[in-house]
Image (cartoon, helix red, strand yellow):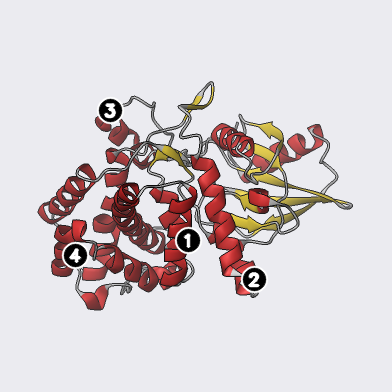
Amino acid sequence: MSTGTVTRADAMSAFLSEVRWGDAKREPIPGDASSRRYIRLRRGEKTAMLMDQPQNAEAPAAAPDASPETRRALGYNALARLAGADCGRFVAVARHLKKCGLGAPEIYAADLKNGFLIIEDLGDDLYTDVLNGGASEKELYASAIDALVRLHADGAPQWLAPDKPLFVYDETALLAEIELLTEWFLPAALSRPIDEALAGEHRDLWRKALRKTSFGPPMFVHRDYHAQNLLWRGGLEGIARVGVIDFQDAVAGSPAYDLVSLLEDARRDVHPDLAESMTARYLEESNATPADAEVFRAAAALLAAQRNAKIIGIFARLAKRDHKPRYLAHLPRVWRYMEKDLSHPELRELRTWYDANVPARLRGALQGAAA
């Protein structure tokens, strides 16, 4: 099918009519950094969300057992274990989250071939907005932590559906994300190309750190578990109050990953005292021993630094390649997190590299990145 605007609009209208939403009022929702878009469907008092995800908009993922070389040939999505434009994976992850008791949306109707879903409308009360409106940080973050504890209670399923494996967040994926910093941020920040020797040194230090860190048994990892992807549904009880979206890139990895995603939020400040109390809550509710807690905190420091390196690279790429400079406003916050993470004794060598190669005056700023 052609991907032209008119043809896709016709296909959308046909799908909506087929599933009896053709007469609904359509209210587009502001977009994010992906190729997806959402439209609220309103018919009287009843609402739903239409997810519009063109299936050829992004490069595909690779098979679970594909070699790093095969994944590299397929492109970044395969390297980093991203779902791409796979609506079927969104459906499979949503059903897994629902089974665990989390507030993921129900799937009402699907056209997986063309990339249309009608899903439950979880409302507009994003954590970000509710917290900005004066809601209790302690209550909302505690509920989000409790949801993680429940999600991790059953470990990581090997398969989300018969044809949808839960990819492993492996070294190849983690390194591919880290390399975004040397590929996109450093050239813009330093106003010069970065030679392969320097990029290779950065990659090798990260590989060494990843290999000497213990991550424990793999758990389900949402991958973008933060205030912009959580909704507060205060009228419900327990962890169902935590609405969860943007989960299609879920993987099997360290339980520390989603915790640091929540507590080192690129888009909002999280006070260190709150972050510490929520980390302690997670460890207590997970029945972690003192030895387990020490291992967990070391993994959390490393994965927080890894995630922040990735985000720095992604925000630079969004500014330079995609002409979305608004993301640069978050870089000072992300660098503050990064510097705290690198202060962990186990990350001393990486700290030395960043101190030597990323001048402090350039951290959090990109001159000319959006040009």
- Sequence-wise, the earlier of marks 1 and 4 is 1
Kind of residue at disc 3? Ser
Gap between marks 3 and 4, in whole Å?
A: 30 Å
Residue hosting label 2: 135
- Sequence-wise, the earlier of marks 1 and 3 is 3
- Sequence-wise, the earlier of marks 2 and 3 is 3
Kind of residue at disc 4? Tyr
Q: Residue at x 46, y 71 (%)?
A: 269
Give the structural element (helix, strand or loop) at label 3.
Answer: loop
Q: Is residue 122 left or right of residue 219?
A: right
Kind of residue at disc 2? Ala
Depicted 84 relative to depicted 367: above or below: above
Q: Nearer the viewer, residue 90 or 15?
A: 90
Q: Residue at x 65, y 46 (%)?
A: 103
Q: Are marks 3 and 4 in contact (CB under 8 Å)?
A: no
Disc number for residue 354:
4
Q: Residue at x 55, y 61 (%)?
A: 141
Q: Quadrant of the N terminus?
A: top right
View extreme (top): residue: 162
Q: Are marks 1 and 4 in contact (CB under 8 Å)?
A: no
Q: Quadrant of the C terminus?
A: bottom left
Quick one: label 3, few (<14), some, or many (20+) residues within 10 Å?
A: few
Disc number for residue 67:
3
Residue hosting label 1: 278
Give the structural element (helix, strand or loop) at label 1.
Answer: helix
